[in-house]
């Protein structure tokens, strides 16, 4: 019988006719009930899309999906026994919907040095961590909202007020070492920082350390991709692509980090959701919720967001007396009862909101099978994910007139309107595809830079978790294999000296002017008889315009991935010096590594300046980008150096 | 491994260290203009694994963090800490006794297997990094510098 039918038979009919292990696993007044018991559940479209309040607003709702959590809740699987730690701005664990699940021994306040993680109200966005926590584990208690894992144990820490304490926050302290799941709805993606270098921002080391938690099974680290799909950062009116790159936050280069993009209530990428080849899956984040009573207004393509808990009271938090919509002001009434009289509930968007939807799903998986390793969890999320927005490549962005999948001319730096494809990435091409859409790799997995492997189906994920429990041989306990980087290509203007020739003996040496305004094969490298987890490409350059440089890779099986696009935000500041700047791609996941991998430089025209739109101190400013010329003062080509390295992280 | 273009570890140049006060707030991730960097005066330069950083002198004694600026003009922050992973606490302690400079403090995070050595100043941390890399070839030894300040997103 189909899974859904068997679950319903076991949990709702009371017949006891299903398999014994599908019987209701929960006791208490809410045993095996869905979130219908909670007064604001109708707004939680991520948990029940079909019955949502928003279904009556077709301008902002329709064609989307939820996480399919209800079949799992009906089984009584609600996160029991799973510890989830929210590293964020702090969390108001005293909120009536968080208090039942709060664990102060898994919490820390870096400001007060106490175990109550209530946020510093002077910090940036102090309510943020309270919203995140509620999305994961708001209790089922007849009040407010319900978390995706409403019986998970929740802890919080105002890590963003104590970032220098990364080793304590990332599992090294007694309180953080209890965590099974970390939720990290934060990031920084604007700087080209070195990776696997003598200098480290500490998160790489810390993240590898959390693989030791859970008695060696590894804690699960779920991370927001970012909200940088913003055209102004790279001087554009329409957002054709993410002007930054999630990989600029080097933490997402770690294979044990699950990077999450955001989907809106119409089944498309949230307009702000960062895109790139390090995205693993997509959660639900919505749009901005800026209009209507509950965020159902449709102006400027807006739509609803994710409902959750807030800082208590109408003074602090996202819900307060001067907020944008009646619900956020505590003024809405349904069926004669006020929805939010004390402003203890709110809604929020962002990959910050999408990430805890996935952390909640992970908690349900670990409830079903606590023996899952970090690799199992990541695999199950991938396997259970659904392809969404299949044809997004042909859609046209707001304020734009060309499809997302158009070619962009490398001389004019403008979209052409002609659709591109992976076949356009070849030596000598003078245009590149801005996105490749959904591509099936040689392992049979479909991947998209916007959505990763798609949106997880919780019912399927939990069923897989149970299969792993029944058949532990499915589990993968060993770590991925992380070799050193190997030199692939070295390029400079003038012939190499004898010393330089020996230094770069392993690289494909190129001499001559940097090949702006075209696609150029940088060279190939060989990989062994392994299965790919991730490809990484590391760049070190001097006098190379990083903002005009894109990178693509082709696997031995012929799969192509865009790891970095040219004309990104690095153009704004004319960045031309970088060391060990690293990109990653999961598009090749599961493929055979053996054979020749080819790397391509997609170099645009650096001699055009762009008008950059920036927000500084909440003021919108425009300015011309810093020059990064392709020629020197005498009109000759710029002297430069570019070293390209790569490695295959293997399963 | 040494390379002319990267992987150079050590002090490149020592300035007169006459840096003036920065008349503007500095936070990790902030991009400084050439003019702003010039206001900071002559700065001590290090090349650490190919990443060039200039140290911004602190005007206050006892500062726990060292501010830096990289080749892109981006401000970084270091707690003068060297981190070691893939080495046991006992092996780190054993090697550490034979090395100079000595850290001001050592903290081991048992659940994650990471040891953090804190030095009194940035230059000592750079020296400590070099010494520990040589003494613990099987370990991952890193000097912590943050070039961005993560924000809620």
Image: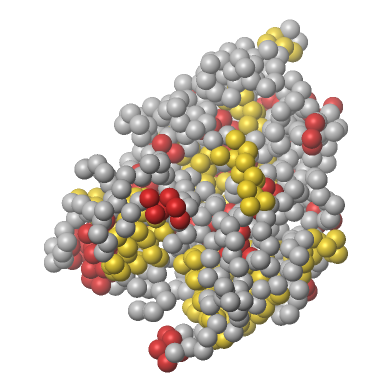
Relative to A476, say whether A115 is above or below. Answer: above
Regarding residue A325, the answer to whether it shows in the image is yes
The single residue placed furthest to the bottom in the displayed view is A498
The single residue placed furthest to the left in the displayed view is B97
Residue A567 spot, x, y in % from top left: 66, 61
Residue B4 spot, x, y in % from top left: 39, 79
Residue drawn 62% across the image and 71% down it? A630
Relative to B68, say whether A618 is above or below. Answer: above
Total numbered labels placed on residues in the image = 0
Task: State which quadrant residue A488 falls in.
Answer: bottom right
Residue B10 spot, x, y in % from top left: 29, 69
Q: Quadrant of the C terminus of chain A?
A: bottom right
Relative to A616, say whether A417 is above or below. Answer: below
In the depicted view, which residue is nearer to us: A252 or A477?
A252
Relative to A537, say whether A8 is above or below. Answer: above
In the depicted view, which residue is nearer to us: A338 or A48?
A338
Regarding residue A24, the answer to whether it shows in the image is no
Q: Is residue A213 left or right of residue A546?
A: left
Residue drawn 52% across the image and 86% down it? A494
Residue drawn 37% across the image and 69% down it? B49
């Amino acid at each position: 019988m189909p899974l859904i039918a068997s679950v319903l038979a076991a949990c709702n009919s009371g017949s006891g006719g299903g398999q014994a292990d599908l019987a209701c696993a929960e006791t208490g007044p809410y045993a095996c009930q869905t979130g219908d018991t909670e007064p604001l559940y109708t707004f939680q479209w991520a948990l029940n899309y079909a019955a949502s309040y928003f279904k009556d607003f077709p301008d902002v709702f329709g064609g989307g999906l939820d996480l399919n959590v209800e079949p799992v809740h009906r089984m009584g699987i609600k996160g029991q026994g799973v510890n989830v730690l929210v590293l964020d701005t702090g969390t108001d664990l005293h909120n009536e919907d968080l208090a039942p699940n709060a664990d102060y021994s898994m919490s820390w306040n870096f400001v007060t040095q106490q175990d109550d993680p209530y946020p510093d109200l002077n910090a940036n966005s102090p309510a943020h961590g309270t919203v995140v926590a509620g999305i994961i584990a708001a209790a089922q208690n007849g009040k407010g909202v319900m978390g995706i894992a409403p019986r998970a144990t929740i802890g919080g820490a105002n890590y963003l007020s104590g970032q220098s304490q990364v080793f304590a926050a990332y599992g090294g302290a007694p309180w953080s070492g209890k965590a099974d799941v970390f939720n990290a709805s934060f990031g920084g993606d604007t700087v080209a920082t070195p990776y696997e270098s003598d200098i480290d921002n500490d998160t790489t080391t810390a993240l590898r350390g959390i693989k030791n938690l859970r008695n060696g099974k590894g804690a699960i680290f779920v991370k927001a991709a970012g909200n940088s799909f913003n055209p102004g950062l790279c001087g554009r009116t329409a957002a054709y692509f993410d002007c930054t790159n999630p990989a600029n936050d080097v933490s997402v280069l770690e294979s044990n980090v699950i990077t999450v993009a955001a989907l809106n209530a119409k089944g498309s990428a949230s307009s702000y959701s960062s895109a790139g080849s390090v995205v693993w899956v997509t959660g639900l984040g919505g749009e901005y919720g800026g209009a209507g009573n509950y965020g159902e207004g449709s102006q400027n393509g807006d739509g609803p967001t994710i409902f959750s808990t807030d800082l208590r009271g109408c003074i602090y938090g996202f819900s307060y007396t001067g907020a944008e919509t009646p619900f956020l002001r505590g003024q809405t009434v349904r069926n004669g009862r006020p929805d939010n009289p004390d402003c203890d509930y709110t809604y929020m968007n962002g990959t910050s909101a999408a990430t805890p939807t996935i952390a909640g799903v992970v908690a349900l998986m670990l409830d079903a099978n606590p023996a899952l390793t970090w690799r199992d969890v990541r695999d199950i999320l991938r396997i259970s994910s659904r392809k969404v927005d299949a044809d997004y490549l042909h859609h046209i962005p707001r304020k734009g007139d060309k499809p997302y999948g158009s070619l962009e001319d490398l001389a004019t730096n403008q979209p052409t309107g002609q659709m591109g494809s992976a076949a356009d990435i070849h030596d000598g091409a003078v245009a590149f595809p801005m996105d490749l859409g959904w591509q099936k790799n040689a392992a049979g997995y479909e991947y998209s830079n916007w959505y990763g492997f798609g949106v997880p189906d919780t019912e399927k994920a939990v069923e897989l978790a149970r299969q792993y429990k029944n058949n532990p041989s499915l589990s993968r306990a060993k770590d991925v294999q992380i070799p050193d980087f190997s030199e692939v290509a070295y390029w400079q203007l003038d012939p190499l000296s004898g010393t330089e020739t020996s230094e770069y003996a392993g690289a494909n040496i190129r001499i001559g002017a940097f090949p702006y305004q075209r696609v150029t094969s940088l060279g190939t490298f060989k990989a062994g008889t392994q299965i790919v987890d991730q490809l990484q490409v590391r760049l070190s350059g001097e006098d190379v315009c990083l903002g005009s440089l894109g990178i693509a890779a082709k696997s031995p099986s012929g799969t192509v991935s865009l790891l970095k696009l040219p004309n990104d935000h690095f153009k704004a500041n004319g960045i031309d010096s970088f060391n060990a700047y690293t990109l990653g791609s999961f598009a090749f996941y599961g493929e055979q590594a053996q054979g020749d991998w080819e790397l391509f430089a997609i170099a645009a025209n650096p001699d055009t300046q762009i008008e950059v739109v920036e927000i500084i101190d909440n003021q919108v400013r425009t300015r011309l980008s810093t020059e990064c010329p392709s020629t020197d003062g005498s009109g000759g080509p710029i002297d430069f150096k570019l070293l390209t390295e790569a490695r295959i992280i293997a399963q | 491994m040494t390379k002319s273009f990267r992987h150079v570890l050590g002090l490149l140049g020592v300035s007169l260290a006459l840096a003036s006060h920065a008349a503007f707030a500095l936070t990790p991730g902030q991009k400084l203009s050439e003019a702003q960097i010039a206001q900071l005066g002559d700065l001590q330069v290090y090349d650490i694994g190919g990443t060039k950083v200039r140290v911004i002198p602190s005007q206050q004694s006892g500062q726990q963090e060292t501010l830096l600026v990289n080749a892109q003009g981006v401000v970084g922050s270091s707690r003068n800490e060297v981190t070691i992973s893939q080495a046991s606490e006992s092996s780190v302690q054993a090697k550490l006794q034979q090395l100079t400079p000595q850290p001001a403090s050592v903290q081991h995070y048992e659940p994650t297997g990471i040891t953090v050595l804190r030095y009194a100043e940035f230059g000592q941390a750079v020296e400590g990094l070099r010494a520990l890399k040589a003494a613990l070839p099987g370990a991952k030894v890193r000097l912590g510098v943050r070039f961005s300040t993560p924000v809620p997103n």
